Image (cartoon, rainbow, N blue to C red):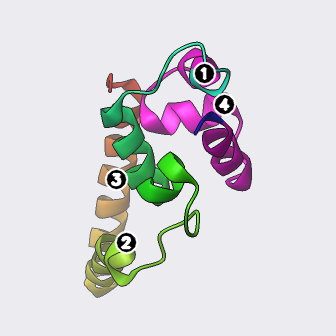
Amino acid sequence: MLNRLKEARKALHLSQREFGERLGVSRDVISNIEYGRVPPKDLLLKHICEVYNIREEWLRTGEGPMFDTSPKASRKLDEAISIFQSLRPEFQEYALTQIRHLAELQDKAPL
């Protein structure tokens, strides 16, 4: 599984730091997992799959495609885009500002 985590990270063109930041963990955590020094916890694996749209079965076993391309995987994004597009320009700007703030809070929050 360790090689698959690294393979997924590289497929996303992310450094260990970038990969970890979006998950709310440090580069050291990702490095320790990739080099087999620390086993990944189930909660982190599920979070990786959710954040990066990676299939959990592939991550754990190597079977099937790496990324989840099912309709349910993109349902939230499609809904958010639809709502955003229906907003007036001034509300779009407000929504975008709020999303940026949420992303900043997420970056600062522990996993």
Label 2 environment density (alpha carbons within 10 Å; few <14, some 14–19, many ≥20): some
Disc 2 is placed on an element classified as: helix
Write down the residue under mark 4: 16
Q: Nearer the viewer, residue 95 or 79?
A: 79
In the image, what residue type sits under mark 3?
Ile
Residue at mark 2 to residue at mark 4: CA–CA distance:
24 Å
Does residue 31 sit above or below 70 in this rendering?
above
Disc 1 is placed on an element classified as: helix
Q: Which mark is residue 101?
A: none
In terms of sequence position, does the residue under pointer 3 or pointer 1 come before the other?
A: 1
Does residue 24 sit above or below 71 in this rendering?
above
Q: Nearer the viewer, mark 3 or mark 1?
A: 1
Q: Is residue 28 left or right of residue 3?
A: left
Q: Nearer the viewer, residue 67 or 62?
A: 62
Residue at mark 3 to residue at mark 4: CA–CA distance:
24 Å
The structure residue drawn at horizontal position 70% and vertical position 47%, both measured from the top left corner, is: 7
Q: Which residues are magenta?
A: 3-32
Write down the residue under mark 3: 99
Q: Which mark is residue 27?
A: 1
* Residues at circles 1 and 4 in contact by the CB criterion of under 8 Å: yes
Q: Residue 37's quadrant in the figure?
A: top right
- Residue 3 in view of the camera: yes
Disc 3 is placed on an element classified as: helix
In the image, what residue type sits under mark 4?
Gln
Q: Which mark is residue 73?
A: 2
